[in-house]
């Protein structure tokens, strides 16, 4: 950033640039925008940041982010607790909830197995999932809803192998052509997945 900028703007832009997906140019624009905001809005913004950092914790059941001991999904007695949908992160819970179709429970891993990045199984919330299943005999199925990537597939297979001796049914999300997709533009892997996961009509 140019040295003609005031130091507080430089420091603020550097903080914004630490956020994912924010480059230095965008960070600088955000820093300038903050300086033009009314002071009460800046105070509210900074308080919201601190409030989120201090009060958000992991649900003691599913490991999703919450401001309570147990998140609203786990507290909801109308949900089917016999099914656990295992996802990589909290954003995936939000995505599945948006469909309005899934009525089971969740378990958030907070990452995927990736030895090349130093992410081993012990760094994820896998032992919490196993403990949860061992403590609750009503759990019948675990849906592996990790992304169809090398890391997502490896994580799904690892957890599946751990659960086989327990006698829990482990399923994987079906992947294939998106709604409205055109066959000629689909890549080979997507087409293969679509064929492999075909359903009877």
Image: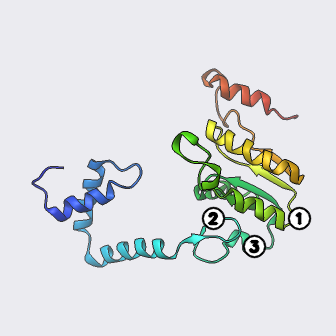
Q: Where's residue 47, x and y in %?
A: 38, 77
Which of 157 and 173 lies nearest the eye of the viewer?
157
User: How far is mark 2 from mark 3, CA to CA?
Assistant: 14 Å
34 in relation to 143, above or below: below
Which of 103 and 5 lies nearest the eye of the viewer?
5
Reading the image, the residue beneath label 3 is 76
Reading the image, the residue beneath label 1 is 138
Q: For numbered disc 1, what is the local secondary structure?
A: loop
Q: Which quarter of the figure is the C terminus placed in?
A: top right
Answer with the quarter of the image where residue 148 lies.
top right
Q: Where's residue 51, x and y in %?
A: 45, 76
Packing grade of label 1 (10 A; few <14, some 14-19, many >=20) is: few
Reading the image, the residue beneath label 2 is 64
On the rendered structure, is 56 left or right of 72? left
Packing grade of label 3 (10 A; few <14, some 14-19, many >=20) is: few
User: How far is mark 2 from mark 1, CA to CA?
Assistant: 21 Å
Q: For numbered disc 3, what is the local secondary structure?
A: loop
Answer with the quarter of the image where residue 151 lies.
top right
| Residue at 62 percent of width and 24 percent of height | 187
Q: For numbered disc 2, what is the local secondary structure?
A: loop
């Amino acid at each position: 950033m140019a040295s003609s900028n005031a130091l507080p703007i430089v420091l603020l832009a550097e903080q914004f640039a630490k956020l994912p997906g924010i480059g230095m140019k965008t960070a600088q624009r955000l820093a300038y925008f903050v300086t033009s905001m009314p002071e009460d809005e800046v105070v509210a913004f900074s308080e919201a940041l601190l409030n989120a950092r201090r009060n958000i914790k992991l649900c003691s059941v599913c490991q999703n982010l919450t401001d309570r001991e147990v998140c609203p999904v786990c507290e909801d007695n109308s949900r089917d607790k016999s099914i656990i949908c295992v996802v990589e992160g909290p954003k995936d819970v939000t995505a599945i909830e948006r469909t309005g179709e899934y009525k089971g429970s969740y378990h958030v891993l907070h990452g995927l197995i990736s030895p090349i990045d130093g992410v081993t199984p012990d760094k994820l919330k896998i032992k919490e999932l196993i403990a949860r299943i061992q403590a609750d005999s009503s759990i019948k199925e675990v849906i592996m809803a990790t992304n169809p990537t090398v890391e997502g597939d490896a994580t799904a297979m690892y957890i599946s192998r751990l659960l086989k001796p327990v006698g829990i049914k482990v399923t994987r999300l079906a992947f294939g052509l998106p709604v409205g997709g055109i066959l000629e533009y689909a890549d080979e892997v997507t087409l293969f997945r679509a064929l492999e996961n075909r359903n009877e009509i």
